[in-house]
Amino acid sequence: MSSRKPQGYEWIKSKSVAEIQPRMLHKLPDRDFKDVARRILAIQQRDRKENALLYYQPASEGVLKVHQSMRRFLGVGGGNASSKTEGCLAEMVACATGVIPESLRDELDWSRKLRGPIQCRLVCESLTTVLYPTILPKLQWFKWTGIDAPGGERGHWGWVPRACLVGGSWERSWSDKFRVLRILYRNPDNWDEVIGESSIQFCSIDQDPSDFASGEFHYIMHDEPPPYAIWRENEARVMRVNGRMVLAMTWPDDPAIPVDWIFDQIYEPATSGTDPEKEWINLFTTENRFIDQTGIVQQMKTWSPEIVKVRIYGQPIRFSNRVHPDFTDQTLWWCFDCKKSSVVEKGRCVKCGSVDVIDYNHVTHIVANPTWPTVFLLDPHPRKPHMFQWVQIDPKDDLWQVAEGQIDGDPVELKRECDRIEGELGLHVTQRLIDPNMGRSPAGVRRKITWQDEFDAVGLHCDLADDSDVGRERFNEYLKPDARTHAPRVHIDVGCTTTIQQIKRYIWDEYKQSLDKDQKQKPKTKNDDHPTLWKYLLNQDPSFRQSFLATQYMCHRGQRREESKRPFEYRSVFVRR
């Protein structure tokens, strides 16, 4: 037996943690073993504090998609406390320091994101109420953010590693005068090597847009929506260096906040896939694993479904005074007991607890059916393109818009385009309707020649539509899922982008000054072309059977012109009894 004694605690205590091997601890007494363990845990806690970014974990699968995105323009719409700001901040700091979180190292090709030392800009809502009390503590390694006590599981220390500060000091790195943070960019594969220096400039949306009109930036993050003028200036700042723009926001439900441009410039091009440089990611508060979900569920029960959609699911309901509020191009839930759109958790409506719920979406991919009757609807314009659409009627009397179009030309060109589309889709057109106001209007200097006459002359025989408001309300009823079929009665093809955009933005007119007056019962004329065509269609209460009966009454060129000039509501053959 060897007379060599095991290495004792005092010997181990003299070593650094890195030098301690598991075999050294094998024969230590329990008390000494626990003491060594406490030392190791203390070092690990200090490391987690000074290098929090290495320990970063995405709060949800949605936040992981934020990091995986390579698009130049990224929109992150999320509910309150959905981790949209945290995720985007961690992303920016990683790109500015070269420090890759261990949880993300294998999730994407970082060589495509890391560009070495970069210049960043962060735009927040306010310097006094957001930057200093909220944003900066999320970056300072010695500040804790989270619902648990410092060092707990649900929270984090500031994302900027202490080793990436100039001299390891926040005071030496931060300029309060210029609101600029200098940080070191380290080699991602060798932390001992400092490659250069990055910087983050902090601004607020209440600054003048001219304040943003200088510099070149590789990464610009907006925390909540900025004015469009600021966004446009920032676009110019990233243009020359092929940089990235990120917008993290919760959609406002206050109509006074101008965010229409976000729909135009980011949300719709990204969600429709028409712009490959843009992406939109939705984050749900209910999926954030670092917050107390019990309180979230309780709060959801007290809020209306509309508020829950914004505050929890980050869905855009920007236009609170929409004429057709139930229309959606995103998948939502409908509760048949509440008789309205709802929020569903675990198969139950959070408002009433009902399980009689379905998911629905009015926009889908549609293949035209050549055996279904089709109605062509036309809204002519003398000073802008003619707008038109085709809607099919199925045997259940549900309506399917299969195509749309616009032509800035004469009736001959419109007829040629109609023939092309109807031929390609194999449409069986049983009736054509025209806006009665424009249809009866003179088409040119010869006042006796109307738009209806002009289109009739080229072979587009259109009846005058009924312009009453009944169709508008009927359209709203068709948008609601039917209790028997568990589906809406209106469906629009994804390719009908103008129709989709206009219905979402078709709003009621408002008084110039709010004097406790009721909402005007008149829609704004902006974005009214396709919604009005839908109103014309619903005014005749279309049916599959009656549309086929109408085929035998379809007039040939030049016939029944006097009768077709009368509003459609008086032609009983097409009216459902």
Image: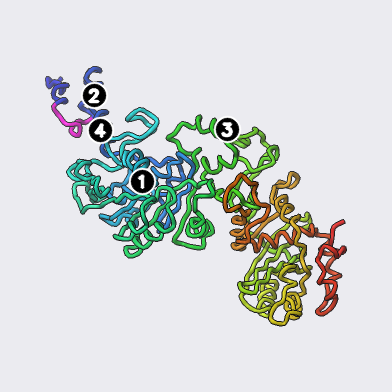
**Which residue lies under the disc numbered 4?**
46
**Residue found at x 51% / y 59%:** 264
Q: Which residues are magenta?
A: 14-21
**Which residue lies under the disc numbered 3?**
302
Q: Quadrant of residue 396?
A: bottom right
**Of the residues under marks 2 and 4, which one precedes in the sequence?**
2
How many angstroms separate mark 3 from mark 4 (CA)?
Answer: 42 Å
How many angstroms separate mark 1 from mark 4 (CA)?
Answer: 22 Å
Which mark lies nearer to you, 3 or 4?
Answer: 3
Which mark lies nearer to you, 3 or 2?
Answer: 3
**Residue found at x 35% / y 60%:** 238
- Can residue 393 be seen here? The reply is no
How many angstroms separate mark 2 from mark 4 (CA)?
Answer: 26 Å
Q: Quadrant of the N terminus?
A: top left
- Residue 20 part of the magenta-drawn span: yes
Label 3 amino acid?
Thr
Label 2 amino acid?
His
- Could you say which disc has been placed on residue 89 in the image? 1
**Of the residues under marks 3 and 4, which one precedes in the sequence?**
4
Which mark lies nearer to you, 3 or 1?
Answer: 3
**Of the residues under marks 2 and 1, which one precedes in the sequence?**
2
Task: Label 1: state its secondary structure.
Answer: helix
Task: Tell me where residue 317 appears, x and y as whole percent.
Answer: 56, 48
- Residue 324 part of the magenta-drawn span: no
- Could you say which disc has been placed on residue 26 in the image? 2
